[in-house]
Amino acid sequence: MGAQLRVYKRRIRSVTATKKITKAMEMIAASRVVKAQRKVAASTPYATELTRAVTAVGTGSNTKHPLTTQAETVVRSAVLLLTSDRGLAGAFNSNAIKAAEKLTARLEAEGKQVDTYIVGRRGLAHYNFRERKVVESWSGFTDEPSYADAKKVAAPLIEAIEADTADGGVDELHIVFTEFVSMMTQTALDDRLLPLSLEEVAQEAAPQGEILPLYDFEPSAEDVLDALLPRYVESRIYNALLQSAASKHAATRRAMKSATDNAGELINTLSRLANAARQAEITQEISEIVGGASALADATAGSDK
Amino acid sequence: MAAELHVALVAADREVWTGEATLVVARTTSGDIGVMPGHQPLLGVLESGPVTIRTREGGTVVAAVHGGFISFADNKLSLLAEIAELSDEIDVQREERELERAKAEGDAHAERRADVRLRAAAAR
């Protein structure tokens, strides 16, 4: 076998191995998307009921709460960025990071200080590499977040918003995450989570102008709101984590699918080249034989004379 | 007036139990409360504790609920809890071990969780 042909054969073997790996990763990601979507669906009843309850308190009483009061001048904002622990997901992480940077730039242009909180090793690595300050970060659960993880993330954020601005507290909380629109579309977006506007929540809960009953609060509207709002924030963060996870798996699936397709194409091209090389080798051998034979024939014909 | 109410017991990550019931007893921060069909709209904060649901068929469902809310309106009752499990799902031996461990380590949260689960399992 010729040297060229051997090189082609070797490359085909290696690309085939890569293709098998990417194909497996694609299928794993596909099954994880379905699982993550199911988790999003399973968490919906709780979120809906909670939204209803928040609306009920919001419309049924004039209670003030640190989580719903808009500061007159916002000095400091917190930005919570949700990324994944692992890459191989196309532009998933860079899109989320870009969205966070745009938001940060906008907030800074408005004269606010920005505290960054990050979920996921990828986002943290990006910020650490650029030596930017990160107040707190979490990782290790981005593939399959549980409610306990959401609580862990929410706790310091709620604490920060309840603290005075002078003591390092923040006045508002933004969240940047990747919304799972469909298998093919995921968009990184930012959303202001706190202070919560009760009117917006009410609109979300009853868009058709449904009238909520007058509730009896047990023990009191303030206490209920006190207990409800942190849970509401946790549930929103939980939902964002789940959507982010679903989006990440969908992005991985897509990236791995195109890698598999590319590998297939590469194998095709390489096999054609290998075929051509083999054919060229054969042609060369034949012409060598023919050339040799005719040279011999010429030689013998010459000696006859 | 309808003689039954629709109950939805939902935890943060799943729906634990839904169905029709005639009476629901839960513990709020200001004491036990029983809700029957036609109750006034209510929104309350739940303590950790067992919740008893008397079903339409006359059976009883007991669930351990760890904090959360009870909300009732239009004969629809929702019990929202971060963590909730039905008494049938509770492994008594495991929880007893858990209680021992929590007591030994002085982990008040874990101790309370295990205690609530055991009480719910006992009321089964």
Image (spheres, rainbow, N blue to C red):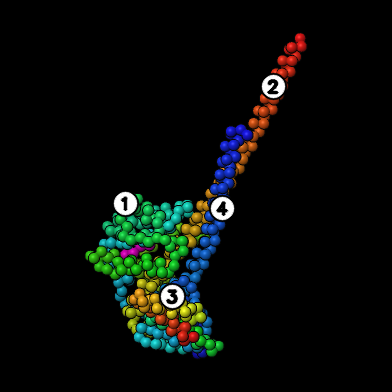
Task: Evaluate if marks 2 and 4 touch, with contact meaning CB atoms under 8 Å apart.
Answer: no
Q: Name the chain letter of the residue that bears numbered label 3.
A: B
Q: Which residues are magenta?
A: A172-176
> Left or right: B13 with respect to A101?
right
Identify the image quadrant of the N terminus of chain A: top right
Q: Secondary structure at mark 4?
A: helix
| Magenta residue check for A173 | yes
Label 3 Cα neighbours within 10 Å, binned few <14 / some 14-19 / many ≥20: many
What is the CA distance from the residue labelled 2 to the residue labelled 3?
A: 88 Å
Estimate the x, y position of residue A11 in percent, counting from the top left.
56, 41
Residue type at numbered disc 3: Ile
Q: To which residue does mark 3 refer?
A: B83
Q: Quadrant of residue A204?
A: bottom left
Q: To which residue does mark 1 refer?
A: A131
Q: Name the chain letter of the residue that bears numbered label 1.
A: A
Task: Evaluate if marks 4 and 1 touch, with contact meaning CB atoms under 8 Å apart.
Answer: no
